[in-house]
Image: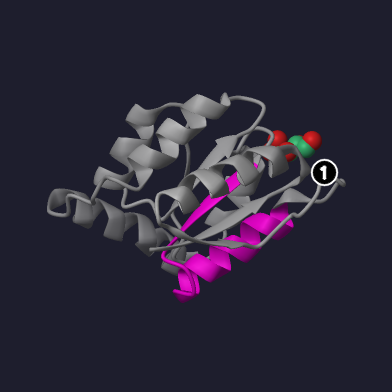
Amino acid sequence: MRVGFGSDHAGFFLKEILKKHLEEKGFECVDYGTYSEDRVDYPDYGKLVGEKVASGEVDKGVLICGTGIGISISANKVKGVRAAVCSEPYSAKMTVRHNDANIIAMGARVVGEDVAKMIVDTFFSEEFEGGRHLDRVNKMMKIEEEN
Ligand code: RB5
């Protein structure tokens, strides 16, 4: 599995930790930046990773900013993206099972390092359930088409 990573300056340190964590588990991690704690704008990285996931260049994405909110809103503007901000593993599990989320987002100023690792581990170990949830996901994606 190829995983695309992105963060702003606030999420940089947690991105580095989670990238290493997933690499140790055998994931192929592609880092789209940012590459330091110099101030940058989260929409640039949400858009970039969103486009990489939507185009299939990577299978899934991990996005981190201070809250996880700005970067996930930005990614969700890209057609085909379903980015979910999660602060605990239960939501990470359910957003894969029910929403078929293709990007997990977190706030580096919200979650601690260990919880963040649990969130990504959960996100990458779950599967979409399909069935009635597929109908709902399709309805969500239709909103994109209509707007
Ligand atoms: C940067 O200070 C901060 O606004 C950003 O990381 C994020 O929390 C925005 O949603």
Q: Which residues are magenta?
A: 43-64
Q: Residue at x 36, y 55 (%)?
A: 140
Q: Residue at x 37, y 30 (%)?
A: 89
Q: Position of residue 77 (x, y in %)?
A: 57, 59
Please tell me in which quadrant of the rendered image residue 43 appears: bottom right
Residue 89, compared with residue 134, is above or below; it is: above
Q: Position of residue 78 (x, y in %)?
A: 55, 64
In this rendering, does residue 17 appear at all? yes
Q: Quadrant of the N terminus?
A: bottom left
Q: Secondary structure at mark 1?
A: loop
Within 10 Å of disc 1 (Cα), the crowding (few <14, some 14-19, many 20+) is few
Q: Nearer the viewer, residue 63 or 75?
A: 63
Is residue 115 part of the magenta span, yes or no? no
Q: Position of residue 63 (x, y in %)?
A: 58, 48
Q: Residue at x 87, y 47 (%)?
A: 38
Q: Which residue is mark 1?
A: 37
Q: Position of residue 120 (x, y in %)?
A: 43, 41
In this rendering, does residue 98 appear at all? no
Q: Is residue 10 left or right of residue 134?
A: right
Q: Residue at x 56, y 49 (%)?
A: 19
Q: How many marks?
A: 1
